[in-house]
Amino acid sequence: MSYYVIYDGNCNLCVTLVQVLENLDGGQMFRYTPMQDLETLSQFGITSQDCEMGMILIDADAPERRWQGSEAAEEIGRLLPAGNGFVEVYRALPGVKWVGDRIYEQVRDNRYTIFGKRDTTYQSGYPIGCRALRD
């Protein structure tokens, strides 16, 4: 299975988390494109307004399967080795997921103020690329 991650390539936090994921995964399961790449987004029927609700994870084998915001972050965590157990516990503890969702929303809406904005858009070494879109 492979997945596409759409992230904010101008957000310092988002880029750092993508770089961590790149190092953990090495391009084996995840491919990336910044939300600033409107040409790639349009091929998935995604607009820049859609991206305002947070990162997007797309199942490359079934592109209609998508997660966004905290749901995308949880799904990425679930897909990582040994991550499923942590995500299940997180989701099962009363009130924890609700709090996590609210924290995600606050960080998403204030990410540039809290973590800063990059001068240039980060391009992953593991891009989605045109070939992936044709497959």
Image (spheres, grey):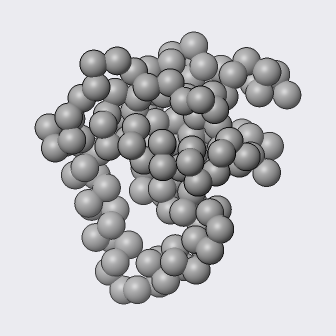
Point 42% across, 56% down: residue: 70
Give the image quarter of residue 79: bottom right
Q: Residue furthest left?
A: 113
Q: Is residue 8 above or below residue 56?
A: above
Residue found at x 48% / y 56%: 73
Q: Position of residue 34 (x, y in %)?
A: 48, 27
Residue farthest right in this picture: 135
Q: Is residue 91 left or right of residue 82?
A: left
The quarter of the image holding the C terminus is top right
Residue at x 27% of width, y 61% of height = 102
Q: Is residue 80 left or right of residue 47?
A: right
Residue 84 lies in quadrant: bottom right
Q: Quadrant of residue 93?
A: bottom left
The residue positioned 79% from the left and 51% from the top of the image is 1
| Residue, far top | 39
> Residue 95, can we see it?
yes
* Residue 6 percent coordinates (x, y): 52, 35
- Visible residue check, residue 54: no
Q: Is residue 14 above or below residue 126?
A: below
Q: How many marks?
A: 0
Q: Position of residue 118 (x, y in %)?
A: 28, 25
